[in-house]
Amino acid sequence: MAARAWLQRLVPLAGLLVLLAVIALLCSTASVFLERRAMLGFIDLAAVVGLYIFVGNSGVLSFGHVSFMAVGAYTSALLTMRPGMKAMLVPGLPALIAHAQLSPPLGFVIGALVAAVVALAVGLILMRLSGMAASIATFALLIIAYVGLGNWDSVTGGQKSLMGVPIYSNLRVAFVVAALSVVIAFAYQETRSALVLRAAREDEVAAAATGVNIYLHRLIAFVLSGFVSGLAGALMAHVLGDVRIETFYLDLTFMTIAMLVIGGSGSLTGAVAGTIVTVAATEFLRTLEAGLPLGSTGFVIKAPDGLADSLLALAMLLALIFFPKGISGGRELAWPVRQPRAR
């Protein structure tokens, strides 16, 4: 029975990944612009899934996961850049990092692991908090990371762009990273740790009374989500070719939260669906802001500047009012497997 239930949830998820692969293939054959937008969309997907691993299972809203993306991006960038470029941009680097030039895939893994270690160090303190106090603490983490990384001139270059990051990521690599993030999230949410954490999400007092170590299970989810977020940040660094601290602050924070809320923070299906819908709608609206010509008529449809951001905020507000569990209803897609007939 357990295997059948697991299969019911796995099949639709595999279908979503196949759909994403088809979208990636269509974008790659359509134009270079659409191919790049699809790569950025896969970055958003990995970031939202990383956020879901903690928020969706614990019920604690986090504003600090973009900090782990920044850690993953800077770590992977510094380990894969040419030594000559690092000597010019950040001459104060430790010798071990200054002379290192690893392959980008290895940089991805190390960047994600360093982000997970940072999440562990931070989580040992923050996971003792609950509710609004924990959310405010994660927002403080975001600010500390922004100020700290933005002023660590000898390592990150401070407010300057860290240029010369190897452009390794193509559409295939971006899809693999996004798909791997979804697989990690699915595998985790099927574990006993995630199950008891979701029970604590629904009733923390009752879960604690039955002997559930809420602190430990929240910490596990926090560290794993930090790993996936760090992986998304490393992917972003190798897609853009440079790292700037401004990239990993409020805009990206609220964008990932909006995608998760619109899709439904209570399910992995919601995280994936919310990302797809939000990215597609946002790109269409930004195209309208830039001006969309109607064939050879010479007429151009142009929307007011800022319309995309305004409608995104409105969509999140409407979702909170009318669909508090998001467009997924907080449920996972389930394949209708026939139950055996009782004898």
Image (spheres, rainbow, N blue to C red):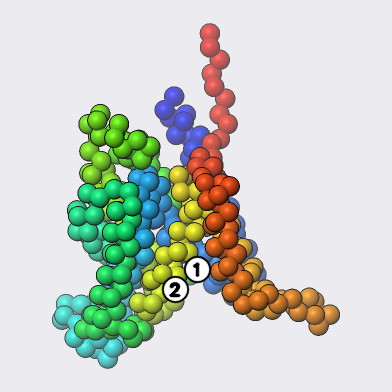
Q: Residue furthest left?
A: 95
Left or right: 184, with 211 as reference point: right
In three-dimensional space, the C-alpha distance between marks 1 and 2, rounded to whole angstroms, equals: 8 Å
Query: Would you identify the image quadrant in which residue 101 lies?
Result: bottom left
**Relative image position of residue 141 (x, y in whole percent):** 28, 64
- Please state which amino acid type lies under the numbered disc 1: Leu
Residue 142 percent location from the top left of the image: 32, 66
Bin the neighbour count of mark 1 within 10 Å (Cα to Cα): few under 14, some 14-19, many 20 and up: some
Q: In x, y percent, where is residue 268?
A: 46, 47
Element under label 2?
helix
Q: Is label 1 in contact with label 2 (beta carbons under 8 Å)? A: yes
Q: Which residue is mark 1?
A: 40
Mark sitting earlier along the chain (1/2): 1
Q: Is residue 76 visible?
A: no
Which amino acid type corresponds to the residue marked 2 in the rendered image?
Val
Residue at 31 percent across and 70 percent down: it is: 143
| Quadrant (top left/top right/bottom left/bottom right) for the N terminus | top left
User: Does 71 sit above or below residue 51?
Assistant: below
Whether 288 is drawn above or below 192: the answer is below
Q: Residue furthest top?
A: 343
Residue at the spot x=28%, y=70% of the render? 145
Give the SS element for disc 1: helix
The residue drawn where x is 38% and y is 37% is 202
Q: Which quadrant of the view contains residue 307?
A: bottom right
Q: Which residue is mark 2?
A: 239
Residue 106 to residue 342: above or below: below
Q: Residue furthest bottom?
A: 88
**Disc assigned to residue 215:** none
> For this rendering, which residue is in front, 225 or 99?
225
Depth check: give the residue in front, 99 or 214.
214
Q: Quadrant of residue 151?
A: bottom left
> At 50% from the left edge and 68% from the top edge, which residue is drawn?
40
